[in-house]
Image (cartoon, grey):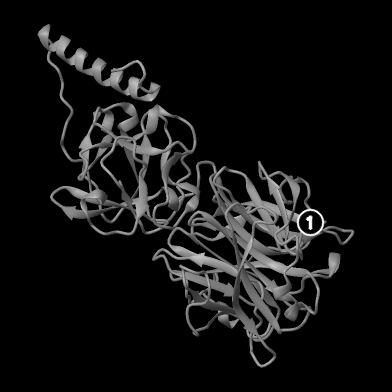
Amino acid sequence: MSSSAPPVQRARSLRRVALAALTIGLAAAGVAVATRSAAAAVVDPAASYVLVNRNSGKALDVYDLATGDGAPINQYARNDGAWQQWRFLDSGGGWYRVQSVHSGKVLDLPTTADGVQLVQNTDRGDARQQFRLADSAGGHVRLINRNSGKALEVWEWSTADGARVSQYQDLDGANQQWQLARLGAGNPAPTGTPTTPPSSYPGPGAVSGATGTHDPTIVRTPAGSYIVAQTGDDIRLTTSTDRTTFREAGAAFPNGAPWTTTYTGGSRNLWAPDISYRNGQYYLYYSASTFGSNRSAIFLATSPTGASGTWTNRGLVIESTTSNNYNAIDPNLIVDDAGRWWLNFGSFWSGMQQIALNPSTGLRADSSIRLIAGRNGGAIEAPHMVKHGSFYYLWVSFDRCCQGAASTYRIMVGRSASPNGPFVDRNGTAMNSGGGTQVLAGHGSVHGPGHQAVLQDTDGDVLVYHYYADNGASRLGLNRLGYDAAGWPFVY
């Protein structure tokens, strides 16, 4: 090996040489040398597993909760979220495709090169996506790729969150060994998460800085920081590095959004955004309307960074007029386990609606529309849907917003096995017939909590919302979410 070789290459070569020398030396001395087992570990194709690396103690993770093809697979502190849960799909002959419960995609190694990043891709069933399980000591296994013959490992023995998972020659190092932690049904909460609701509603978690907000939505960035988008002129942005201290970050459209003024009466105030990160870019759905009117529209913008001034208008998604029985505001995007995109939206009128989106554009896919929740024209708005365990949870706000400390907003939820419903509450009442289980309402100096979003973070689920203080100011509220034995959420 030339001394001009990169340090990583030299380290890798030295590792191989050292192992080979040790084996030869032991054999020469008459010492029995144990060979690595090629036996296949037994897995249950009907079960889900978390794969925990022996060296780092961290779990195989779909980075940043991505759902798209080519998304990287890294390691992260174990939290048993759906993005850390994997199923083994039998390909025959002892080979398996390893499927993400979160995205429905399978593990894929694009080339046979050492160090190539492990990614997820649509299941094609080819050799790049097939793995066998080879036994290692202590009940661990190695995942050997059928195309390359190489083992999955945490690159360079890293123990850091976000370290990439790659392939390398099968050396049976601890960084190539994985524990298969079988999970039961559903999506277990991180260790220490309570399963019994508190006797009364807790106060919002501690936050500081730029915490005045209305209709907040939050996303975790690939770097681990946070962006909050909220109602305001040109869509107001704030950021945080720790989910506690928030800072002003300008507006999404600092030069205005003239394409929206037909619906706003000339105002620059845009409402109720929904921000997410998918396929390497940020998506922002947002509303343009005037108070009390259903002459409204939902638009889409995208950005490579999420920062002020980097957002590109992608166009109108859906509009409503006075002849419609719905109101096109309060959008929320969900991508289901099959990779289908849905936009939920609505405020008052007939209730919460859902349309299909084209994943390649983020815009409306067809003319279909379905009712997913309603109160016979009563006060319901702000739909937000997330998948947790076996269910899609539909969060909504009941009653009156925007009246300061006199607001009666409260946060409700129902669930369904399908993103299309039917959604029912704890008592089995259909949400499109007024059903909903209350999760948070006004208490003490917290008035009218609502317009909620759920952040599925690395340490568990977090409910994000606004509420009104005694002086009528609108504030940011964050509470952790637990799930009881029946899988119903509560704040703590």
Residue 52 at what x, y percent from top left?
Answer: 38, 38
Q: Can residue 394 be seen from the camera position used here?
A: no
Q: Can residue 254 be seen from the camera position used here?
A: yes
Task: Report the side of 248 relative to 384 (left or right).
Answer: right
Residue 113 at what x, y percent from top left?
Answer: 28, 38
Task: Report the side of 131 relative to 469 (left or right).
Answer: left
- Vertical placement of residue 114 versus 389, above or below: above
Residue 85 at what x, y percent from top left?
Answer: 39, 50
Residue 141 at what x, y percent from top left?
Answer: 26, 36
- Vertical placement of residue 331 versus 205, above or below: below
From the viewer's side, name the closer residue of 209 and 80: 209
Please, what is the three-letter code of the amino acid marked with disc 1?
Answer: Arg
Q: Residue at x 76, y 74 (%)?
A: 400
Numbered marks: total: 1
| Residue bearing mark 1 | 475
**Element type where label 1 sits in the image:** strand
Q: Residue at x 75, y 66 (%)?
A: 256
